Amino acid sequence: MEILRTPAERFADLPDFPYEPRHVEVEGGLRVAYVEDGPAGGETVLLLHGEPSWSFLYRRMIPVLASAGLRAVAPDLIGFGRSDKPADRAAYSYAGHVAWMREALFDRLDLRDVTLVGQDWGGLIGLRLVAEHPDRFARVVVANTGLPTGDQRMSDAFLAWQRFSQESPRFEIGRVVANGTVGGLAPEVVAAYDAPFPDDRYTAGARVFPALVPTAPDDPAAAANRAAWEVLARWEQPFLTAFSDGDPITAGGDRVFQKLVPGAQGLPHTTLAGGGHFLQEDVGPELAQVVVDLIAATPR
């Protein structure tokens, strides 16, 4: 398997992202990169990004969390950011991503009493980790994400995005992220999202990700996601939804969690105004404050 590693110089002078990358190795010799900030003894907030972003997405949230005495940990999924990137699309699967993150976060970093913040694929992967390792998590915050099983039709916006990702001859990562915001992005921020991908060989993981979302009942990941929902249907720890008001892809998905997850009952679920799909860009500090307030209100 050919493994690509983005040259470090591609990440020079990232705007508002001064964090030095750290690394752990998982099965197959793959290197997972992550950044962290805040006191080592603070409660751990796990920030999981989605498609096609990387931990840079959380740069407006990490300082708020760290200033509140929390330990913010933001990994790059395999295929993204500073993490290694298998060049073959066949190397990527939903189950594989869950396994890579489990090994990195639990076997290597030994994270415990975690508050998950998951957006986009960060929710799809993070919620599987919650369901399969519930003893590792204290709270969950979901933002513009879901846990599809293929039993319900996905939104037209998602299906259009899925087709584009597989069929478009050009796949400009920075432009994709910018198009998923309300306020747009400065050129240097667009360049930061492009940085992990020097050429098309590096985009295999980003290209294949939308095709891995279960959209049919017999999808390879459908059964595991149904099993995860069975666990979430018994989850009584705090489970908060913090979706934005401007995401056509996940609109309404928050209501499913509020209805089905016991831990969601009685919490101050919020809809953040002025946020697109990548709400961390549009309303990142506001989302971070939601997380801070939840942890303060629900001590271990």
Image (cartoon, rainbow, N blue to C red):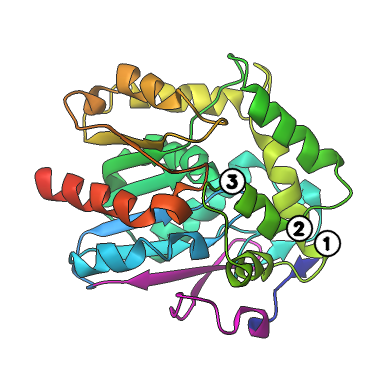
Local secondary structure at mark 3:
loop
At 37% from the left edge and 39% from the top edge, which residue is drawn?
273
> Residue placed at 25% from the left, 27% from the top?
264
Q: Which three-letter amino acid code belongs to the residue tagged 2?
A: Thr
Q: For mark 3, what is the residue?
A: 180
Where, by quadrant of the figure, is residue 238 drawn? Answer: top left
Side of 77 where 215 appears, left or right? right
Q: Residue drawn 61% across and 79% down?
A: 11
For this orientation, the residue located farthest to the right is 169
Lateral position of residue 181 relative to residue 140, left or right: right
37 in magenta: yes
Labels 1 and 2 touching (C-beta < 8 A): yes
Element carrying mark 2: helix
What's the residue at 79%, 33% (across, down)? 163
Residue 52 seen in the current view:
no
In the image, the segment drawn in magenta is 9-38
Residue 107 vs residue 231, the one in the foreground: 231
Which kind of residue does numbered mark 3 sit on? Gly
Image location (x, y in percent) of residue 278: 51, 48
